[in-house]
Amino acid sequence: MSSTVSAYTPVTTSGQITYSGLGNGTDFDALITKLVQVEQGRITTLQTWKQSWVRKQEAFQELNSAMLTLKSTLKGMDTVGEFLVKTTDSTNSLVLSATTGSDALDGSHSITVNRLATAKAMVTQTGYSSADTDINASASDATFAYVYQGTTYTLSVGANATLTDLASIVNNDANNAGVKASVVYDGSKYYLQMRGMDTGDSASLTIASNTSLTGFTAAKFDTITSNASALLKLDGWPTASNAYITRETNTVTDLVSGLTLSLKSTGTVTITTATDTDAVRENIQTFVEQMNTVRTLLQDLTKYDSSTEQASILTGNYGLQLIDTKLKTAVAGKAVGFDYTLDTYSVLAQLGITTDAEEGSDTEGLLIIDEDTLSGILASNATKAAELFAASYVGRSDTSEMALSSYIANTTQCGSYEVSYTTDASGKITGATINGHAAMWHSNSNLITGSHGYDEAGLVIKAIDVTAGTHTGTVSLKQGKTGELVDLLGELTDSSDGPLHILDENYDDITAMIDDKIAFEERRIATYASNLRKRFAKVDSMLSTYNQMQTQLDSQIAQLSSDS
């Protein structure tokens, strides 16, 4: 009888017992590996589960990034000045150029520059062979004094001071209100130049009578230019030939509303202001495209295909549904502080911007533009269209009984406020509310102020009608769609309590919990594998014993057969 069982000795490596083949021909090492692999299926399941949450987090981060990009884009067009692009052309930019603000009215103006504003400048008559020549020959300090814009500045000039020293003394005087001293060179000699830095009739510069420094008294200076104001006419006004509009500087901001004029030379020019409707259209197109980028991402993350019963990674997620609803409501709803009756446009649909509701359309659920409607509005009323997009703290009252006086930006919230106040027979306010909340009032000035802790905090309203009785009205601070969405996106992407941040933190907790489960399974399986090896080691030892017994029996049987 031949044996199929061979002797087997377990090999121990780093505390692990491995088997290359056992006495009965069974590969226990492979068996253990298979049993462990079965148990590791639980880890694989957990890893797959974790990966699904990680992908959801990555989707949140992608959406958050897209929303921050949208916020940044809208932030760049959330004032009328940024959204409503206007241009102004000058028939001669060498005489006058202009930059345009959003409040500039379309149209043309003729402007005559009869004289530029100039500053006073004068130079000493006496020149010196060197800038370092001693200009104070006396053994004691001398006085150098000048009068600028009606104020006298008296300076002490030390013995043996040079021309360079004198310029430095003037320039480094802490009280110097706008005079620049410099050393100038005509090719053979050096002189002191005194120049006022301000233009206009009031920017006078003279040498004071108490100057004792020899060679630097008033009579020793020649005037290069005199201080003078600019002389202008606007559309031929003032009409008298010798009458002019005066301005102290060559930069004029208050002659034509919304325009900053830069005067460069004398002459007459025509400036023409117009709305750049192409630029406004481009801003609207950017608004729509950027909104659609976020909408498309939300659709992709939450869609469900009923025909294949396939759901996206975040289908049914409440947080994304909330974000989607808030964004759509903000886009489609009435602009903050606007009124359907009092405002030309109060919703984007009036401009031809709507959501495509056609099922199966390539742009289903996205914003679309009716180009004909938009073109007509931009051609006739671009300013009001821009206001719907970009109004920022534009105030209005629906009654002549009261007026909006002031507000505190970023404290007072844009919106519409119902105001009520009562006055007595003497015309004094005796009580006031804003949106039903008790307000503060100032009887002497008839001012009503919104109370702290409410949206109207910092809002100041002036009571105009103070006849005895109760007066009511609505005061509004208007905010356009871009500003409204910037605020909303700021809330949704807030890194402390925004919904995306909260969801991301929750998913961090979930993935951490799964990691704990994986670590537990790894420890359990390691223990399980160790126990298997110990158990099979015992089996191996037993088989080895049996193998020895079989060998002995085979030997004895063989001996008996030989004896017989």
Image (cartoon, rainbow, N blue to C red):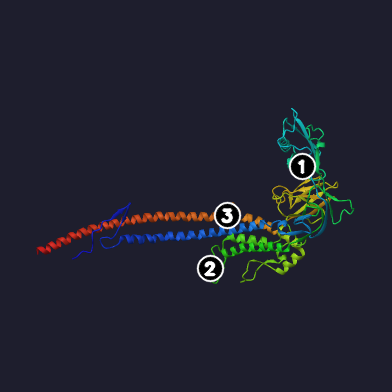
Q: Nearer the viewer, residue 280 or 516?
A: 280
Q: Quadrant of the N terminus?
A: bottom left
Is label 1 in contact with label 2 (beta carbons under 8 Å)?
A: no
Q: Earlier in the sequence, mark 2 or mark 3?
A: 2
Q: What residue sits right under mark 1 in the picture?
A: 195
- Element type at mark 1: strand
**Local crowd size for mark 2, using a 10 Å CA cut-off: few (<14), some (14–19), many (≥20):** few
- Could you tell whether 327 is left or right of 382 in the image? left
Q: CA separation, marks 2 and 3?
A: 27 Å
Q: Earlier in the sequence, mark 3 or mark 1?
A: 1
Residue that extends furthest to the front in the rendered view of this protein: 188
Q: Position of residue 306 (x, y in %)?
A: 55, 70
Q: CA separation, marks 3 and 1?
A: 60 Å
Q: Residue at x 28, y 58 (%)?
A: 539
Give the label, 1 or 2, closer to the camera.
1
- Could you tell whether 120 is left or right of 11 in the image? right
Q: Residue at x 73, y 68 (%)?
A: 373
Q: Earlier in the sequence, mark 1 or mark 2?
A: 1
The amino acid sitting under disc 2 is Gln
The amino acid sitting under disc 3 is His
Q: What residue sits right under mark 2 in the picture?
A: 310
- Could you tell whether 344 is left or right of 505 in the image? right
| The disc label shown at residue 501, or none | 3
Q: Nearer the viewer, residue 546 or 149?
A: 149
